[in-house]
Image: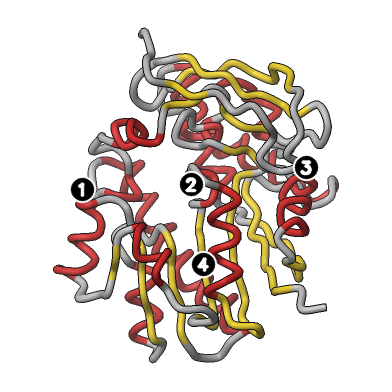
Amino acid sequence: MERTNNKELKICPVCELAGFSKYLEVEDYFLTKELFIISRCNNCGFLFTNPRPIDENLAKYYQSDEYLSHSKKNKGVFSWVYYKVRNYSVRKKYELIKRYKSRGSIIDIGCGTGEVLKYFSEKGWSAKGVEPSDNARSYASNKLGLSVETEDFIKNIPEKSFDVITMWHVLEHVPQLNDRMQQLKTILKDDGVLFIALPNYNSWDAKHYSSFWAAWDLPRHLYHFSKETFSQLAKKHNFNIQEILPMKFDSFYVSLLSEKYQTKKMNYMKAFIQGVKSNSWAKKNDLSYSSLIYILKKDLS
């Protein structure tokens, strides 16, 4: 499919130097079947989608009922499993955050249909959400009674407003990466905690599926992180990483989608086996799981 109105980055978003090489060519298996290129910075190794659609055209790549994080339609075994795991994950996220903050104010950026926010609100937190999808935001606001705003809201938040900021598989979607990191630092309290979950292309499942790896998710994912490159980005914006934790269920979810892209079938058993292999490999290889949670605090020194 022919693409128009793309833009090409000339400097690396992390180290801000020029000079890239082609890392991988990946099809948009999820929706358009277009081909996109992942570039690798020759200086720092950061991976990013380049060229990519202009910001105004990105929304069309999310326009599908199958985009589960923005859909409440429960169809088939895959969706049923997805929602069961998601509900479990909501509880685990609450338990994780409670280790750092027992109560306070939280903003979930990219909150989808608001299940995480709802859970925190019921536990007595002051909970706020940001969600670009009109449908998801409407559901969270009108059905769940949550306070959810558009992306523009972030620019107007006063300094040091939140005890906790969360972005669960969201940062890789944000067009202006460095602007967003600066915004996060601005609105986080000095003793606040930032939680960012990201896919990890150094995982076993990423290496196994190569261009079919579902977590490339081009062009919706504009940036592709390893622990090393995210650490560089965090340091650039004066954040200290406190802890890096695995999201072990993601290897199964990503493997199932990757099997679908590679074989045109939903191979549940094979995907389960590959997920087990990925998690087992990660235990022995620097905890390189399919997805990782980075827990950050401001560097106040």
Above or below for 244 versus 118? above
Of the two numbered discs 3 and 4 on the same chain, state the one appearing first in sequence: 4
Left or right: 171 with respect to 205? Answer: left
- The kind of residue tagged 1 is Lys
Of the two numbered discs 2 and 3 on the same chain, state the one appearing first in sequence: 2
Of the two numbered discs 2 and 4 on the same chain, state the one appearing first in sequence: 4
- The kind of residue tagged 2 is Val
Q: Alpha-carbon distance for marks 2 and 3? A: 30 Å
> Extreme top residue here?
2
Q: Examine the image and state in which quarter residue 238 appears.
A: bottom right
Q: Alpha-carbon distance for marks 2 and 1? A: 25 Å
Of the two numbered discs 4 and 1 on the same chain, state the one appearing first in sequence: 1
Q: Alpha-carbon distance for marks 2 and 4? A: 14 Å
Residue 73, label in figure: 1
Looking at the image, is mark 3 or mark 4 nearer the viewer? Answer: 4
Q: x, y (%) of residue 235? A: 77, 59
Left or right: 160 with respect to 30? Answer: right
Q: x, y (%) of residue 227? A: 76, 49
The residue identified by callout 4 is 166
Q: x, y (%) of residue 40? A: 72, 26
- The kind of residue tagged 3 is Trp
Query: Is residue 67 visible in this depiction of the protein?
Result: yes
The residue identified by callout 3 is 281
